[in-house]
Amino acid sequence: MHPILAALQANADDIIAVRRDIHQHPELSFEEHRTSELVARLLTEWGYEVERGLGATGVVGRLRRGAGARRLGIRADMDALPMDERTGLPYASRHPGVMHACGHDGHTAMLLGAARYLAERGEFSGTLNLIFQPAEEGLGGARKMIEDGLFEKYPCDAVFALHNSPGAPQGRLLLRDGAAQASADSVTITLDGIGGHGAMPHSAADPVVAGAAIVMALQTIVARNVDPLQAAVITVGAFQGGTAFNIIPAQVVLKLSVRALDREVRQLLEGRIKALVSAQAQSYGVSALVDYQRGYPVLVNTPAETDFARQVALELLGEGNVILQAQPITASEDFAFMLDEVPGCYLLIGNGEGDEAGACMVHNPAYDFNDKNVPVGAAYWALLCERYLSA
């Protein structure tokens, strides 16, 4: 066993207790006041320069050592989800309707474990910037931190982040260079027709029929416009309209989630959706308004930084516990905004598979972060820091 991992496993109980405390007190995006204060207090106690309030509720801890010129950034997210917890755990959420169902409590704890180790025993020369980010869950906390001057105040030559992955063996690290996670855009389509009696459809312009045609036609974009070797998803998550059996409504609203693993494909999807919706609506005699909101961009890991991250993983865990080029996934992640600014790598750590604890999928009321990963993730960040900021 690597000595850093052995040291962190021997002293994991305190950080696991912090993880469970955060889990009991989950906070939604941009409301992470208690979590931020806890993080800031611990970093201060361990000797970091600490800034609170970057990106509303974000925290950055900086530790400088030696004369090294390199600057490293490591990010963890802190926010929870608007869900009721149903784990029955003794440390379950104390706040109805709010739950750490994506493991951000664990991500924060892993980075805190590394922070303590590096402050007390780390051997490196350079500047370490630990970024505790708010509002990953849809509100773009990474972008907010960047807009507030994150990389101007805390320049980084490379930046790294990690997320747990239910379905993969506990503690296994999964890396991928290139596009690793999809962009995520939201589209609201409003169809305005002419309402009328359900028995006399000829006197109306039915937006329900137009909407149904659009739902089916949208799937042809992926099937016939996107290169078969590329990935794309168009999901209609909501079809809203009508109030009664015999009333043709005047308006229907469709809500779409649109994802791609390539920036050019993302652009293609936007153009084709707008053109197809307009043409279909016109053919059914209704009008269409398309509100296309770009969300998180494609997350692209840079080759050199990903290869470096692989070597650290192999050194820490050995070949049997590292996937060198994992499959991409169509979930999205706002760390992509940071990677658009600074080279780096976003990797995954297995949370458990099969009957293992931690195998429950994220965003599920029965999910819990696997505490066995706290020392593993902390050791990975500590070793990555020592190797990147080698004396």
Image (spheres, rainbow, N blue to C red):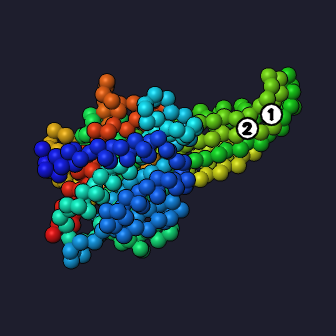
Asked whether 287 or 318 is in front, the reply is 318
Q: Is residue 166 above or below residue 200?
A: below
- Going 20% across and 62% down the picture, which residue do you hit? 122
Q: List the residue tagged with mark 1.
A: 249
> Looking at numbered disc 1 in the image, what kind of residue is underneath it?
Pro
Name the residue rendered at 18%, 49% in the picture: 7
Give the camera-side residue of 66 and 197: 66
Residue 89 numbered mark, or none: none
Q: CA distance from mark 2 to mark 1?
A: 7 Å
Q: Secondary structure at mark 2?
A: strand
Q: Determine the image quadrant of residue 219.
A: top right
Please provide percent x and percent y for residue 262: 41, 51
- Residues marked 2 and 1 touching at CB (< 8 Å): yes
Write down the quadrant of residue 153 in the picture.
Answer: bottom left
Residue lying at 38% horizontally and 54% vertically, measured from the top left: 76
Q: Is residue 9 above or below residue 387?
A: above
Looking at the picture, how far across and down is residue 233, in whole percent?
48, 40
| Residues packed near mark 1 inside 10 Å, few (<14), some (14 to 19) or many (20 plus) | many
